[in-house]
């Protein structure tokens, strides 16, 4: 199957304006923008036919073209990254079987997360979309709980059934547990990795579906699938020693830079 990776990026963000152009310092001291690091992550994925950045902002287009990325200009009225991916695929003339939405705030996404995601969707014909989930260890869960206690919106968690079909996604920490866990101990909480793989027909239909109350309350675009009665496959991925976190707030920059330093990522 032909695979397109789209990296949606917008300058106007209520929580972090200009986030795609924020710089992250790697293990050897090199400062590279968030959008370029996300593009590099996409370039490392095998089995991909094309990678594009989708934006509505000239500043992001200029920055991306400067480091060699292909850019598709999309409408400023796109409500979220999935709508922007749908428009980008349309602008490109369609033709791809699977479109991956690699959100531009996840530069630490390992290539095997996306490779496993695409394989999972290919093998689940009943699903219109798939997304990775990563089991939290005790340290990761503590980070989630610390964010919520401080009033910060950090990562997203996911719960799913025995067939790995998503039951719900939330910016709260779910499922609730009163247990305490050692830093390296596995927990029942799964971190939702903000990457999606869509079948082309499901992606094209998405912008026409109604925005439901859960999507509005949580601010999570994938809930539109669930509120419209569509199935999302959760694909469990393995960290393989890699640390992972998305850049949601300015406070996440030192956290991600520390992870890059620890992993020796430039």
Image (cartoon, rainbow, N blue to C red):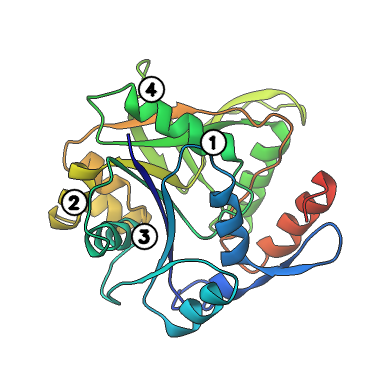
Residue 204, which numbered label? 2
* Mark 3, residue position: 81
Q: Is residue 190 visible?
A: no
- Assess whether mark 2 and mark 3 are in contact (beta carbons under 8 angstroms): no
Q: Position of residue 170 (x, y in %)?
A: 42, 44
Q: Which mark is residue 113?
A: 1
* Label of residue 16 in the image: none
Per the image, the residue denoted by label 4 is 164
Q: Quadrant of residue 80?
A: bottom left
Please state which of the two labelled residues, at mark 3 or mark 2, is closer to the viewer: 2
Query: Quick check: 10 left or right of 188?
Result: left
Counting residues from the N terminus, which is met first, the one under dot 3 or under dot 4? 3
Residue 78: x and y, percent?
28, 69
Q: Earlier in the sequence, mark 2 or mark 1?
A: 1
Q: Is residue 148 visible?
A: yes
Q: Position of residue 257 (x, y in %)?
A: 76, 58
* Other-residue count near label 3 (Cα within 10 Å), few / some / many at <14 / 14–19 / ≥20: many
- Residue at horizontal 70 percent and vertical 68 percent from the top: 32
């Amino acid at each position: 199957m032909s695979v397109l990776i789209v990296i949606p990026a917008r300058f106007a963000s209520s929580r972090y304006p200009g986030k795609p152009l924020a710089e992250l310092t790697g293990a050897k001291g090199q400062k590279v923008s968030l959008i370029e690091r996300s593009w590099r992550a996409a370039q490392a994925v095998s089995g991909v036919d094309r990678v594009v950045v989708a934006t509505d902002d000239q500043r992001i287009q200029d920055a991306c073209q400067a480091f060699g990325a292909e850019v598709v200009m999309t409408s400023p009225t796109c409500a979220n990254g999935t709508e922007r991916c749908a428009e980008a695929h349309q602008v490109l003339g369609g033709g791809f079987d699977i479109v991956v939405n690699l959100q531009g705030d996840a530069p630490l996404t390992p290539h095997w997360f996306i490779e496993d995601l695409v394989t999972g969707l290919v093998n689940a014909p009943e699903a219109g979309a798939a997304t990775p989930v990563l089991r939290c260890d005790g340290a990761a869960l503590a980070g989630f709980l610390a964010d919520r206690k401080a009033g910060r919106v950090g990562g997203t968690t996911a719960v799913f059934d025995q067939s790995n079909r998503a039951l719900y996604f939330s910016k709260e920490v779910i499922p609730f547990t009163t247990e305490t866990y050692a830093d390296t101990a596995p927990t029942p909480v799964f971190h939702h990795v903000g990457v999606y793989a869509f079948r082309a027909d499901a992606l094209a239909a998405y912008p026409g579906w109604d925005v439901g109350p859960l999507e509005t309350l949580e601010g999570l675009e994938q809930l539109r699938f669930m509120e419209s009665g569509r199935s999302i496959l959760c694909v469990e991925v393995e960290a393989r020693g890699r640390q992972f976190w998305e850049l949601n707030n300015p406070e996440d920059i030192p956290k991600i830079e520390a992870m890059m330093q620890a992993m020796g990522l430039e």
